[in-house]
Amino acid sequence: MHGDDVPSFFNEETHDKKGNDAIFAMLARCMEAKSAGADVINATVGSLLDDDGILAINSVVLEQLKNAESIEYAAYSPLGGKPDFLDLSITTALGHVRSKLENLGIMATSTATPGGSGALRMSAANLASRGDKVLLRERHWGPYQGFLREAGLKSATWPLLGTDSEDSHPDFAMPEFETALTDLINEQDRVLIWLNDPAHNPTGLSMSPSARDDLLDIVMAQASSNLHKGVTLYIDSAYTLYAEETHGWAETILEAIESGLPWPENLLICFGISFSKSHTMYGMRCGAIVTVHPNQELLERIDEIFVATGRSTWSAPTRLPQDAIVRIHSDEQLSLKWEEERDAFTKLLKDRRDKLLSSCSDLGVKLVPSHDGFFAFLEHDNPSAISEACASRHVYVVALAGGVRIGVCAANQNQMTRLAETLKYAIEEVNE
Ligand SMILES: Cc1ncc(COP(=O)(O)O)c(C=O)c1O
């Protein structure tokens, strides 16, 4: 139903709400071809599949979910989350750096959310004003736009990759970021930046330590020279537990503080935590928003605000996964066993990515730099044509704005050469 056919009970905001996204549509085609007997490569989904195409599950997590006391299944969670879970989520964000930051007076608070998606929604509801633009990289996870729409927000972007200019990094378009941030600070009373790093979806790009330093410097400098404006750097760390520098951002913050940079009162740093991927509990909807700031009173106020938003959006977070995660990580043996399985998944991803990157490089197929996590990305200005050309050879990738996403998490290592060859064929066919 479109235009005049739309019944009047739908409000205007519904007009942009469309059904099945590109990922699920392509997955359905892949499954259909597979049932018809085709030798398919499924590089569509965003969950980690084992080499037989079955969802990879961390057995420690599954066992602890099943072993929970009845009350953990049945009772409500405290509205902001269980205290021991909240503490653990802060350590998940800051790792070994946490105590050093605390000794320097940089404190953190946490509110439990339904996955990393809930954390994004929470920041959109409270850290930007209706009509504002949230600053994103040009390539970003598709649902970001939906979270913004639901909160009455828009986006402004800066490019994912730098140009060859001297002051750019290969993995961070620094001058463009600085300009975009300055423009927004001049236009709005508060600026929220969503940065998905490390192991960016959809490219697998992870920023280098020097790029992180420079980004934080710019944010701190802008906040310091605009003390009457609010600035929030929200680090979406959904894939960080599969990245080489898991706590890279906490290290960058610590280095900035140790080098004597004063923390501007009007700067917040948030970490969006998702346990969906790291603990293979996608359906459990478990995550948190961790907020870092030197002022304890302000952090308490943030807690109050976030709990109020949670209460009137999803009521309480899910209790069972919070309990299971705490039991795992407060037991040395269980925690080690979880880590071993997580490490095996990380190796699976690394081996697949290495094979894809080397096969593409041998064939002259240029992918966006890809380091960690679930995805790799081929830029192209006709992504649908590329994904259709691939699908004609039963290789299924997802067409997104600006290119196609390759699910390293879904296709296995032995399929990577064929995948690279198919990308080459598709590029040649479409560019002809
Ligand atoms: C970039 C990014 N951020 C956040 C999330 C949130 O995940 P969830 O809500 O399942 O925890 C995802 C999930 O795919 C993601 O890709």
Image (spheres, rainbow, N blue to C red):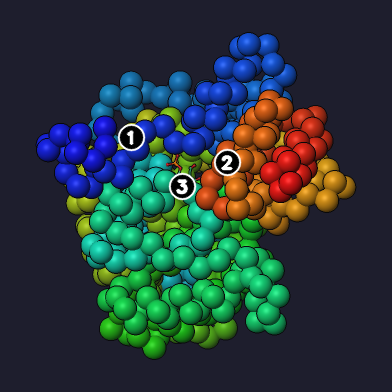
First in sequence, mark 2 or 3: give its number: 3
Residue extending furthest bottom? 225
Q: Which amino acid does label 1 sit on?
A: Thr
Mark 2–mark 1 Cα distance, whole angstroms, equals 38 Å
Foreground residue among 326 and 29: 29
Q: In this view, does 288 lie above or below 4?
A: below
| Residue placed under numbered mark 3 in the picture | 142
Can you tell me whether the CB of the residue at mark 2 lies under 8 Å from the nearest atom of ligand 1? Answer: no
Mark 3–mark 1 Cα distance, whole angstroms, equals 25 Å
SS label for mark 3: loop
From the viewer's perspective, tell me whether residue 304 is left or right of residue 139.
Answer: left
Disc 2 or disc 1, which is closer to the eye?
A: 2
Judge the density around disc 2: few (<14), some (14-19), many (≥20) Cα neighbours within 10 Å.
many
| Residue placed under numbered mark 1 in the picture | 318
Q: Which amino acid does label 2 sit on?
A: Ser
Q: Which amino acid does label 3 sit on?
A: Gly
- Give the position of the N terminus as an image quadrant: top left
From the viewer's perspective, tell me whether residue 380 is left or right of residue 365.
Answer: left
Residue extending furthest front? 432
Residue 367: x %, y % from top left: 72, 52
First in sequence, mark 2 or 1: give its number: 1
Residue 287: x %, y % from top left: 41, 44
From the viewer's perspective, tell me whether residue 296 is left or right of residue 107.
Answer: left
SS label for mark 1: loop
| Residue placed under numbered mark 2 in the picture | 384
From the viewer's perspective, tell me whether residue 364 is left or right of residue 178.
Answer: right
> Visible in this render: residue 81?
no
